[in-house]
Image: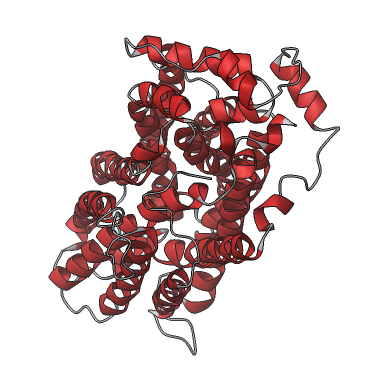
Amino acid sequence: MSSKNVVPAVDTESRKDALYDSEEGYSHAYGLKCNLNIWLQGVAIVLGQVQQGLHPSRVEFATLALFAGLILGATTWGIMADLIGRRLSFNITLFLAGVFGIAAGGAPDFITFASLEACLGFGVGGNLPVDGALYLEHIPQSYQWTLTLLSVWWAFGQLVASLIAWGFIDNFSCEATATICSKSDNMGWRYTYYTFGCMTFLMFFIRFVVFDLQESPKYLVAKGRDQEAIAVLEHIAKRNGKKISLTLEQLSVIESAAEYTPKSNLEVVKSVFSTISLSHIRPLFSGHKLAINSTLIILCWGLIGLAYPLFNSFLPLYLQQRIVSSTDSDSINVTYRNFAIISIMGIPGSILACFIVDWTRGSKSRWSLGGRKLTMAISTGLTGLFLFLFTTSKTDGAVLGWSCAAGATQNAMYGVLFAYTPEVFPAPHRGTGDALASSFNRMMGILAPVIKIVTTSATGAAAPGSSANGSIFVAATLFLVTAVLMVFLPIETAGRAAM
């Protein structure tokens, strides 16, 4: 029997014990990864200053370029994770994000800036679909709920980005109403990007030196590389001062592993491009129940991919346009102060979702509460409701209040969605499944700046024949539609081992 067909069966009690031993050393490593959200938020944070300094006809084109890179990155690296491994894909994408992020900070004109944003997106977009699969495959079923908790680091990344931007942009930027803005007077956004790039390289260094990131044992078993899988588990257990009970002989009893000859990374990459096929896509839709679930979850990712950036990718612009009680001299300070407060409110949303996902799921009653689906549906629906209320805001307090509420619920939504998605894809094809969901998410997201451009003028005012809140109305409606779709997902993963 081929080892590729028996991976779920390998999840024996001994294997669970071994993975339990390895979990402690990895929870912190992946927290560092989730700070890549600084780049997704970083683009939104600097749009106003880029518009002043580089004078594009529409600054939203930078977001469009970013999402073009995110699409290509999510599609390429998610599939490559199933082909060349999670670890190699994971580290390459982080390096790319650091290089092109720093380069974008030094862009002399808007075309160069947008081009480098696309390259940055290629790295960031490739990292996101890989990390969930890699983390999930290092922990036992009883600790799968911690994948939801990782969204706290996503929120923390947004907070770090907002605080760094607040310090630099508030002190090294032209006033919001300035008609002439030289490069020397508008260095705040560039300092912000340089800082983000240095942080990214620091995380890249920490992965190699401090955490010594290992390949996924499930990926290795799926490739028939049992001896390497045991070595990885032994390495992680040793780092935690423990020993594993799983042996190579026990794996051999479960499956007949083909003889494997270790290859270099270059040899792996060369062999992959000669064997690429749809073999990792078809199993995601095998069986009626799995086909429906895979279709719905990918659709949900797509709708959220459009709704989320319609609001969040332009949130600093929305906030600045709605400040009614501040003078021109301190409007930038108030804008980034509010953005930091909204970022802080995302953290409790993620923690709350983590506690709810498995609440009372041990009960067999059909009325048992909690679970991934219910938590996702409620948090997504509330996000849509809060965005509708945001458009009714007439005071600074109302703008900030509804923004904070939406920030909390959408972080809860993304936290559970981030955990649920890799759980419902079979392990040998998990990277591909995550890639399809993430790439569709980005494909829809590329429409966000288009809608923003169509519904508003370059100054943010309503375009002829549309409402200034038109893009937010679209986002809120999409969130509500997605909440309904989540209710009909046929697979609930709370309290169950990942496939």
| Residue placed most toward the observer, 261 or 410 | 261
| Residue placed most toward the observer, 300 or 62 | 300
Q: Tell me: 312 left or right of 134.
A: left
Q: Tell me: 412 left or right of 71.
A: left
Q: Does residue 86 appear anywhere in the picture?
A: no
| Residue placed most toward the observer, 24 or 492 | 492
**Rendering quarter of residue 288:** bottom right
> Residue 202: x, y in percent?
40, 21
Tell me if residue 92 comes above or below residue 407 in the rendering.
Answer: above
Tell me if residue 429 comes above or below residue 254 in the rendering.
Answer: below
Query: Looking at the image, which residue sits at the far front?
Result: 253
Q: Does residue 391 appear anywhere in the picture?
A: yes
Q: Tell me: 407 left or right of 451.
A: left
Residue occupying the point 51% across, 42% down: 128
* The N terminus sits in image quarter: top right
Tell me if residue 465 comes above or below residue 498 in the rendering.
Answer: below
> Residue 344: x, y in percent?
21, 49
**Rendering quarter of residue 172:** top left
> Residue 162: x, y in percent?
28, 45
**Rendering quarter of residue 194:** top left
How many discs mark residues in the rendered view?
0
Residue occupying the point 22% across, 53% down: 352
